[in-house]
Amino acid sequence: ACAAASGRSRGILNKVSLAQTVVKAVKSAMSDEAFQALSKLRAVDVTFHEKSGHVQIKYLASTKELSSIVAKKAPPPKLPKPAKNDKKADASCPITEFLSRHQQNQAALFPDAKLPNNSTDNNTKKRFLTVRSIPVFESSLQPEVHELFCRYQASVHGDSNPFEDIINPSDSQTVNSSSNSDGSEYEFYQGEKHPGFLDIDTAYPHLNDSQRAKIKKSYLSFYRFLCETPLGQKKRRTSSHPSNNNNKNDDDVGGYDISIPFGTYHQQYRLSTSPNSFDGPLLAVGVVDLLPTCLSSVYAFYDPRLSTHLELGKYTALREIEWVRRAMQLRVDLHYYYLGYYIHSCQKMIYKAEYKPSELLCPVNLKWVDFEVAKRVLEERSPVRHCAPLWDESLEEEDTGADVDCDVAVAQTWTCEKPKKKRVGFDNDIDDVAIDIGAGAYVSVGHLNEEGRTLIDPIVHEFVREVGIDMCDNLVIKLA
């Protein structure tokens, strides 16, 4: 039910959050004796599955009670099997729905474009997921890539979608139809002849100036974020095989184009009409940097509604990992897959920890640390900010080759030593830290009397431990 509600809301409602709410309500009911007395079955435990959002409730009942319940339960009615050409059955298929929606969107964005006569029938035909690594400055010239990015950002991050009032004019809730940008930045980029910079006026000549101004502003942000790159793009090696008409190489097997040169790519995922073609609508894009020793995942965006069924974000990451595994056979220096920055307290980054085994780079010592070890260090050493050195020499393996006990090493490394005290009972190291006492007046901690220091010192110590004493020189602590 939680997953179904999430799907009907088009991803607005999170199935895991719904499941957590249901679990909380059921646990509350389990503690209510009057509620439990209404049923012959007694609920003893309730859990939920993080990936599916399904809630499982464990009941306790005697054999006699179960037999009584089963006897009273009527057999379920037999439902007729839907015919193969049943239109309702086709409409319930997420792939069919995506293809139909894509066709409607394209008709709204490009009304003068001619659609094939059998486009409706094509939506019910078998499709194949094909993936190609498109050089970034080729992908950035394709309008549908930017349109998919806007759709994803609007659904997942709440950004404004400049195409929404064009595709669904009756559903548009735009408060201000005028653009806040005068287009000067876009015109500047266009005048500078940046590679792969799309001419919005040429791509959407039928739209009015206000609509194109919104798209220009959005496209400029998209280009700066996911298209500008310091990496050079060399021409790809092509195969001399006469049957090769899809820009593929002999080393590219199973749709994994592992022979591409170094550079930045948009790995495009399309629902094509055959396994060897690349002609279908775009459903996902993975932005990657290919370097001599690694494949770095920069970003991924995809159709948010379809992803509620297929989990496209996880699929793109898993496919990139498989790409590296295959490419390692051809590229002797390629060994690693990078998922980018990790912030332990950021909910949107926690998914990166699901791919194991993995390591975190210590920001202080620039050493790679096993994620489970790093996680314990972050949570023990910096429980609020989750920012602390992750590595120390004591964590290295000794010359004897014996493995280091990580639990012991972490405990020894991060045992907090109390600051040296210059006077009994108080720490002079925080004397200069400023606090706001109200009415715009600031005082230093050292100016407080003994009673004030007893109350304030523990709070200030916790703040300094998380922020750092150097940063505190430029801050004023306001006590709520």
Image (cartoon, grey):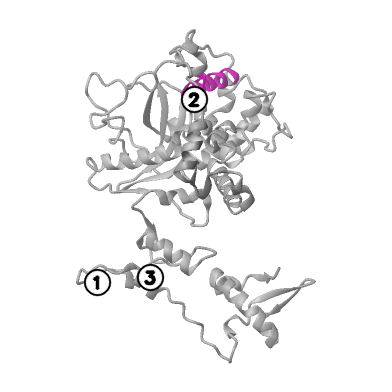
- Residue situated in front as seen by the camera: 135 or 374: 374
Numbered mark located on residue 398 in the image: 1
Q: Relative to 264, is 349 above or below? A: below
* Mark 3 or mark 2: whose residue is earlier in sequence: 2
User: In this rendering, does residue 320 appear at all?
Assistant: yes
Specify the quadrant of the image occupied by residue 170: top right
- State the residue lying farthest toward the left: 400
Disc 2 marks which amino acid?
A: Pro
- Front disc: 1 or 2: 2
- Residues at circles 1 and 3 in contact by the CB criterion of under 8 Å: no
* Mark 1 or mark 3: whose residue is earlier in sequence: 1
Is 69 displayed left or right of 292 in the figure?
right
Q: Which residue is mark 2?
A: 76
The residue depicted at 43 percent of the width and 30 percent of the height is 138
Residue 441: image location, x then y, percent: 76, 74
- Disc 1 to disc 3, C-alpha distance: 15 Å
Asked whether 107 falls inside the magenta stretch, the response is yes
**Magenta segment:** 91-108
Q: Relative to 231, is 346 above or below? A: below
Image quarter in which the C terminus is found:
bottom right
Image quarter in which the N terminus is found:
top right
The residue depicted at 35 percent of the width and 38 percent of the height is 319
The residue depicted at 35 percent of the width and 53 percent of the height is 358
Disc 1 marks which amino acid?
A: Glu
Residue 137: image location, x then y, percent: 44, 33
Residue 307: image location, x then y, percent: 48, 34
- Disc 1 to disc 2, C-alpha distance: 66 Å
Q: Which residue is mark 3?
A: 410
Circle 3: is it few (<14), some (14-19), or many (20+) Cα within 10 Å? many
Specify the quadrant of the image occupied by residue 184: top right
